[in-house]
Image: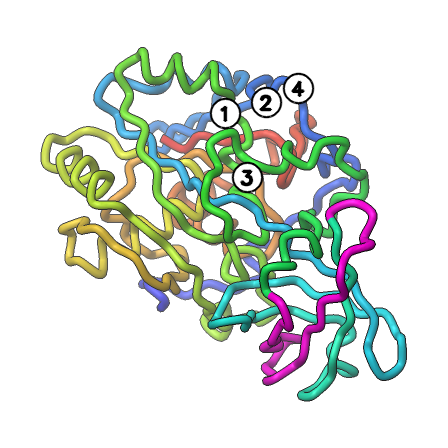
């Protein structure tokens, strides 16, 4: 689902980033990362540390987090007929023992192909798990049937983005401290900056913290390759908004209190539900396919915590729609000049 009223080109969201600014490791503690604050009304940019976010939050604000947890979605195996290497990235469960996945090499993994995957959390000496390709799709997507779905948690590894080349000493560092629902193939990275102590201070300030779920999949991380972004295929990601959270958000809107989204995934889910329910913000559980481009009118969210995103990405398009393209371009240029760290383990931005 596309919602926009101006035409843009994918090349409008291109920028040059020095490779050394791609963060390879997270900072410690989490809230010591840098924070760039964008004031949309005044077109101003401020610089501070993430722990200073309290200065920009007010009692009565509602801070909304995505509690999805990254699952061990990357699997390595051998093709049964040749012994050649195979790689699987699980995207979402589609039925009993059935999963949608990205596979490599896609040209050799056609319908009927079988992959042998060793299980066992560390030593990989557990039973062999078989994955059979039962259907094919475009872009390397396959429907796989697993011989024993219960073995999946010990068969896979936590997938890191391809631009991170340094192994993590602690894979939990690629999870938010509040992640509870397995289902994502990439972290909702804006939330990586929060610590339990910071969350306590936010609560003490009178800010309400609510949780929703959007399991991160292809809609979040697949790059836009078409010059006209309208031609970019929109996939589906599963989202949940509980009745308790829906009631809190509805009350906030009625009382004029700010809804501050942590992450673009949270923003897309809330805007999708807002549009679907005609502004009623009802409870929701289902598939989300909202692609936000400049020209979109936000109806639900008032502020956004986010990271610095890849060029030509749907995430950069979303923040440009929220903050305005010129302000985002200026902010990104400033971030590069001042040595901000980019992408998943990088610094953060608060758009007010």
> Do labels 2 and 1 touch, CB within 8 Å?
yes
Residue under numbered circle 1: 194
Within 10 Å of disc 4 (Cα), the crowding (few <14, some 14-19, many 20+) is few
Measure the C-alpha gap from mark 2 to mark 1: 6 Å
Left or right: 32 in relation to 324 = right
Q: Mark 1 near mark 4, Cβ–Cβ under 8 Å?
A: no
Instruction: Give the label on residue 30, or none.
Output: 2
Residue 12 placed where, x, y %?
Answer: 55, 57
Q: Residue at x 66, y 62 (%)?
A: 89
Left or right relative to 151: residue 245: left
Task: In the displayed orientation, state which residue is furthest to the left.
Answer: 254
Which label number is shown at residue 189? 3
Question: Could you tell me if the residues under marks 2 and 4 are in contact, i.e. CB atoms within 8 Å?
Answer: yes
Pinpoint residue 285: horizontal percent, then vertical percent: 30, 57
Mark 1 or mark 3, earlier in chain? 3
Crowd tier of the residue under label 3, counting other residues whose Cα lies within 10 Å: few below 14, some 14–19, many 20 or above: many
Q: CA distance from mark 2 to mark 4?
A: 5 Å
Q: Quadrant of residue 302?
A: top left
Mark 1 closeness class: few <14, some 14–19, many ≥20 residues within 10 Å: many
Per the image, label 4 sits on a secondary structure element best described as loop
Label 1's element? loop
Secondary structure at badge 2 equals helix
Spot the residue most to the right: 83
Please tell me which residue is depicted at 49% across the width and 71% down the height of the picture. 96
In the rendered view of the protein, which quadrant contains the C terminus?
Answer: top left
What residue range appears in magenta? Answer: 121-148
Q: What element does badge 3 sit on? A: helix
Residue at which label 4 appears: 28
């Amino acid at each position: 689902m596309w919602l926009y009223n101006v035409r843009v080109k994918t090349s409008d969201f291109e920028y040059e980033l020095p490779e050394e600014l791609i963060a390879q490791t997270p900072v410690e503690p989490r809230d010591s990362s840098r924070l760039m604050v964008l004031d949309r009304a005044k077109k101003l940019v401020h610089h501070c540390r993430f722990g200073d976010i309290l200065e920009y939050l007010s009692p009565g604000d509602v801070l909304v987090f995505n509690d999805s947890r990254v699952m061990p979605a990357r699997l390595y195996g051998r093709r049964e007929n040749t012994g050649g290497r195979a790689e699987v990235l699980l995207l979402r469960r589609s039925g009993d023992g059935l999963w949608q996945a990205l596979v490599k090499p896609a040209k050799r993994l056609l319908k009927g192909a079988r992959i042998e995957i060793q299980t066992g959390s560390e030593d990989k000496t557990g039973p062999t798990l078989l994955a059979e390709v039962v259907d094919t799709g475009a872009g390397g997507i396959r429907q796989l049937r697993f011989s024993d779905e219960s073995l999946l948690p010990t068969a896979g590894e936590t997938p890191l983005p391809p631009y991170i080349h340094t192994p993590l000493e602690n894979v939990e560092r690629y999870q938010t401290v509040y992640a509870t629902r397995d289902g994502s193939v990439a972290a909702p990275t804006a939330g990586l900056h929060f610590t339990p102590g910071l969350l306590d201070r936010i609560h003490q300030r009178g800010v309400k913290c609510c949780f929703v779920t959007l399991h991160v999949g292809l809609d979040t991380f697949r790059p836009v390759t078409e010059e006209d972004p309208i031609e970019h295929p929109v996939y589906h990601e599963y989202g949940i908004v509980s009745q308790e959270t829906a009631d809190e958000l509805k009350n906030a809107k009625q009382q004029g209190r700010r809804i501050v989204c942590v992450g673009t995934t949270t923003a897309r889910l809330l805007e999708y539900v807002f549009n679907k329910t005609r502004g009623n913000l009802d409870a929701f559980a289902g598939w989300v396919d909202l692609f936000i481009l400049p020209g979109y009118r936000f109806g639900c969210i008032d502020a956004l915590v986010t990271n610095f995103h890849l060029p030509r990405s749907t995430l950069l398009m979303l923040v440009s729609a929220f903050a305005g393209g010129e302000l985002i371009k200026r902010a990104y240029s400033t971030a590069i000049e001042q040595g901000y760290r980019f992408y998943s383990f990088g610094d953060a931005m608060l758009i007010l």
